[in-house]
Each structure stands twice: as structure tokens, then as C-alpha cells.
């Protein structure tokens, strides 16, 4: 009887643990340099995030996070807060204005220096104009 009870408890524990509370996702974040990488990753490490690794080459931020503590939307908001655009979710002009001059990823000259094409948000484009041509975000 004790072994049957132990087996039932063990099966319950296994089935509960089978439902992962961790999500793995990647998002595109605009940036240019090592300073951008550090800023993006530090911003993404909000409580509940276990891994945030941004590639300067691909502009992809790989994330592993506890989906019971944090959402993708809250991570995106934290990245916007430090001035970086996430695909379809640009930082406000005020947020972007706080970025160091060498990190101005919306500036075509800075992008050209780094061998990059168009920014996720067009240079000089206001927050509202971004939405007029189909850009979206939740804040």
C-alpha cells in the first residue's frame, strides 16, 4: 500500500513538472555595438528572465524566461525603456534620445558605419508615423 501511494505521488509530481513554466523565444532588437549589447541584455534581465543573449551580427535576442513571472511584452517594454527598438515595438522618441551618440541605430550614417541596412524604425519617424505604416506595439 505504501509503495502504491508513493507511486501515485511520484506520478503526480512528474506530470506537474512536465508542464514547463519556462518559455524560449527570440526577438529582433535594433542596436549597433558592444555598448548596445550590454544595454539590451541588462534591460532584458528583469525578474523571471533566466537568459538574455543579443547577437550584434543578427540583432536577435535569445530569451529564456519563467512565463509565470514575466511576459514577452514586459521584456519588450523594458528594452524600449532603455531606448532600443524591438521589431514592431519601437521605443518612443524620448526613450531613444537617451542613447549614447555612437549607439544611434536609427541614424543612417551610424548604420552605414556598421554595415547595416534599414532600421526597424525609420530615421526621423515619429512614434505615430511608425504606426501609420503598419508598425504596432502595446504601449
Image: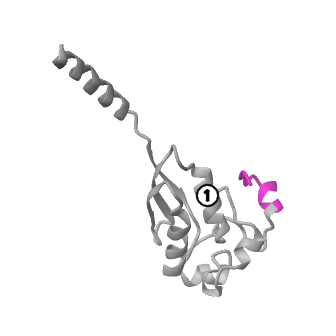
* Quarter of the rendering occupied by the C terminus: bottom right
Q: Residues within 10 Å of mark 1 (few under 14, many from 20)?
A: many
Residue closest to the eye, 12 or 91: 12
Q: Which residue: 60% across, 78% down?
A: 111
Q: Mark 1 = which residue?
A: 76
**In this view, 102 is above or below 67:** below
Q: Which residue: 78% across, 68% down?
A: 125
- The answer to whether 57 appears left or right of 80 in the picture is left
* Quarter of the rendering occupied by the N terminus: top left
In the rendered image, residue 39, in percent from the top left (x then y), is placed at 55, 74
Residue closest to the eye, 132 or 97: 97
Tell whether position 7 is magenta.
no
- The answer to whether 4 appears left or right of 50 in the picture is left
In the rendered image, residue 4, in percent from the top left (x then y), is placed at 20, 16
Residue closest to the eye, 20 or 58: 20
In the rendered image, residue 114, in percent from the top left (x then y), is placed at 53, 81
**In this view, 28 is above or below 35:** above
The span picked out in magenta is 128-139
Q: Which residue: 65% across, 86% down?
A: 101
Amino acid at each position: 500500500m505504501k509503495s502504491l501511494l508513493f507511486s501515485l505521488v511520484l506520478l503526480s509530481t512528474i506530470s506537474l513538472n512536465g508542464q514547463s513554466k519556462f518559455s524560449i523565444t527570440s526577438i529582433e532588437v535594433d542596436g549597433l555595438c558592444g555598448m548596445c549589447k550590454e544595454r539590451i541584455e541588462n534591460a532584458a534581465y528583469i525578474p523571471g528572465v533566466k537568459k538574455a543573449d543579443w547577437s550584434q551580427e543578427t540583432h536577435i535576442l535569445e530569451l529564456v524566461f519563467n512565463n509565470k513571472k514575466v511576459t514577452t511584452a514586459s521584456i519588450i517594454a523594458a528594452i524600449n525603456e532603455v531606448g532600443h527598438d524591438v521589431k514592431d515595438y519601437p521605443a518612443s522618441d524620448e526613450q531613444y534620445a537617451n542613447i549614447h551618440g555612437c549607439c544611434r541605430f536609427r541614424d543612417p550614417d551610424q548604420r552605414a558605419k556598421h554595415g547595416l541596412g534599414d532600421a526597424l524604425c525609420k530615421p526621423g519617424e515619429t512614434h505615430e508615423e511608425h504606426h501609420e505604416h503598419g508598425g504596432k506595439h502595446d504601449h
